[in-house]
């Protein structure tokens, strides 16, 4: 049995496909222990960008989750969100957190200011930027996300490597500050396997961060970041090996925002 897959999307975010029941069905087929839904959360005003559900679609998301639970009553299904962390939106995130008894919230940093750094349509900004400076800023915001205590999991911790723009400076100090904040609030990080299919050809985060995370006592989850149902649990075999190489023996699962620890499979 593979670990729980806590990072999945669906048609509501407008750049993924499939219903939540289809994700649950593929979770069962692909042998993951649990599925968690974590679609891109709505912004307080629609039109912020074009890659998330509208605020008015939140009820549809939740009723679709109920349908999936009704269709697969014996399979553990968790309901969460992948929430964009923008430092000025902490009040909005608290508001969202109270709108439903979520099992977990993933806090992800996609935006530095108005730039969504992983958006292929904006790759030109990378070419015009100081890569070391972007990495440094990214981890400053990520550290605030972890320190906020608003989230159960921090998504794809080294997302700036997506298009393979790598820092030339030593970022260990930035990584350590982030991981100390995560350990203090007991916010997990995920091994996000989608990176293996991106230009960086690695899971998020890489071994250096994962090893430091283990040493700092940061809990771990797994996520495929599936944008199509067939990708649920993708590369989880490799991800388990990576976790073990970093020192991990357990990962965590969440129910109503409470963590439980589970031994990694053989
Ligand atoms: Zn997405
Ligand atoms: Zn994301």
Image: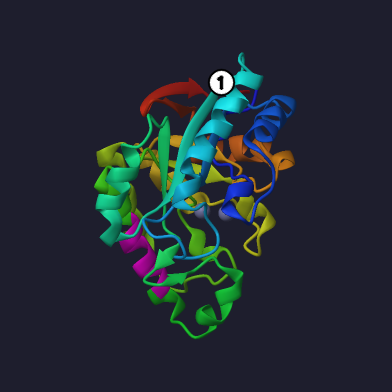
Q: Is mark 1 within 8 Å of ligand 2?
A: no
Is 65 situated above or below 91?
above
Residue at the (64%, 27%) spot, across then down = 32
Q: Which residues are magenta?
A: 134-142
- Quadrant placement of the C terminus: top right
Q: Position of residue 237 (x, y in %)?
A: 67, 35
Within the image, what quadrant is residue 22 found in? top right
Q: Which residue is mark 1?
A: 76
Q: Position of residue 73 (x, y in %)?
A: 61, 15
Is 66 situated above or below 241?
above
Q: Which of 66/110 is in front?
A: 66
Within the image, what quadrant is residue 85 found in? bottom left
Identify the residue at the far bottom of this view.
128
Q: Position of residue 156 (x, y in %)?
A: 49, 51
Q: Which of 216/159 is in front?
A: 159
Q: Is residue 77 magenta?
A: no
Q: Is residue 228 visible?
A: yes
Residue at the (50%, 46%) spot, across then down = 57
Residue at the (55%, 76%) spot, across then down = 122
Q: How many marks?
A: 1
Identify the residue at the far top of this view.
74
Q: Would you say the magenta stretch is mainly helix, strand or loop? A: helix
Residue at the (69%, 48%) spot, across then down = 17
- Local secondary structure at mark 1: loop
Which coloring applies here? rainbow
Q: Is residue 135 magenta?
A: yes
Q: Is residue 234 visible?
A: no
Using residue 146 as the reference point, say whether residue 62 is left or right of it. Answer: right
- Quadrant placement of the N terminus: top right
């Amino acid at each position: 049995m593979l670990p729980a897959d806590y990072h999945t999307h669906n048609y509501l975010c407008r750049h993924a496909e499939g219903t939540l029941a289809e994700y649950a069905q593929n979770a069962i087929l692909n042998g993951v222990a649990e599925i968690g839904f974590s679609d891109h959360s709505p912004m307080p005003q629609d039109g912020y960008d074009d890659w998330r559900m509208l605020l008015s679609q939140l009820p549809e998301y939740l009723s679709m989750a109920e349908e999936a639970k009704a269709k697969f009553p014996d399979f553990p299904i968790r309901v969460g969100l992948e929430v964009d962390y923008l430092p000025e939106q902490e009040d909005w995130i608290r508001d969202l957190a109270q709108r439903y008894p979520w099992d977990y919230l993933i806090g992800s940093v996609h935006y530095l200011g108005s730039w969504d750094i992983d958006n292929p349509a904006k790759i030109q900004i990378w070419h015009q930027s100081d890569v070391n400076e972007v990495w440094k800023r990214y981890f400053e915001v990520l550290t605030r996300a972890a320190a906020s205590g608003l989230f159960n999991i921090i998504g794809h911790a080294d997302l700036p490597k997506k298009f393979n723009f790598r820092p030339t400076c030593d970022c260990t100090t930035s990584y350590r500050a982030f991981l100390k904040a995560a350990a203090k609030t007991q916010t997990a990080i995920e091994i996000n396997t989608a990176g293996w299919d991106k230009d960086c050809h690695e899971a998020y985060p890489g071994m250096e961060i994962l090893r430091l995370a283990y040493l700092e006592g940061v809990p771990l989850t797994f996520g495929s970041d599936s944008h199509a149902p067939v990708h649920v649990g993708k590369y989880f075999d490799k991800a388990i090996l990576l976790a073990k190489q970093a020192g991990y023996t357990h990962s965590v699962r969440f129910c109503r925002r409470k963590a439980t620890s589970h031994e990694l499979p053989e």
